[in-house]
Amino acid sequence: MNQPEAKHVLVVDDDAAYRRIVARMLVGAGFKVTVAEDFRAAMRVIDGSDPVDLLLTDIGLPLGTPHGLSLGSVARVQHPALKVLFMTGDQDPAKFALFAPESTSVLAKPFDAEALIAAVNSMLA
């Protein structure tokens, strides 16, 4: 019996430790994971030959580079079917819903594995 192919999640965060932790949680739940540290690296993955099912990006990316909201917008223009889940440490993540078009959502940091997996599964359902 063939197993369904694992969904591909791209994790974008400028904090290397956070990228590793989030990637580990997702891999443990059976997802295929690629990580990127900034806008440019993320777009190389998104535009690559291995389709990404979900972009999981921090809203705050390195100073002097486009932020996660821009990354989500550009990625969805180029790949309209791409789902986007934003992460933020902001105390009021609901305010980012104004910037989140259809097929996007916002997850408040810090979160545990259960909350992360629930949010990712909800986005990919």
Image: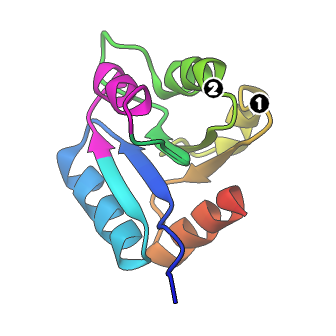
Boundaries of the magenta span: 35-49
Residue 5 as seen in the image, left or right of residue 39: right
Q: Are marks 2 and 1 in contact (CB under 8 Å)?
A: yes
Residue 119 on image: x %, y %: 62, 63
Could you tell me the amino acid type at mark 1? Pro
Residue 55 on image: x %, y %: 51, 42
Callout count: 2
In which quadrant of the rendered view does residue 24 lie?
bottom left
Task: Look at the numbered disc 1 and give the secondary structure of its residue.
Answer: loop
Q: Could you tell which of marks 2 and 1 lies nearer the N-terminus?
A: 2
Kindly report which numbered mark, 2 or 1, lies closer to the viewer in this rendering: 2
For image coordinates 40% across by 42% down, the residue present is 50
Could you tell me the amino acid type at mark 2? Arg
Residue 32 as seen in the image, left or right of residue 117: left
Q: Residues within 10 Å of mark 2 (few under 14, many from 20)?
A: some
Vertical comparison of 120 with 79: above or below: below
The disc at residue 76 is: 2
Kindly identify which residue carries mark 1: 101
Towards the viewer: 121 or 13 = 121
The residue furthest front is 1
Residue 2 as seen in the image, left or right of residue 85: left
Q: Is 38 inside the magenta-drawn segment?
A: yes
The disc at residue 61 is: none
Towards the viewer: 14 or 124 = 124
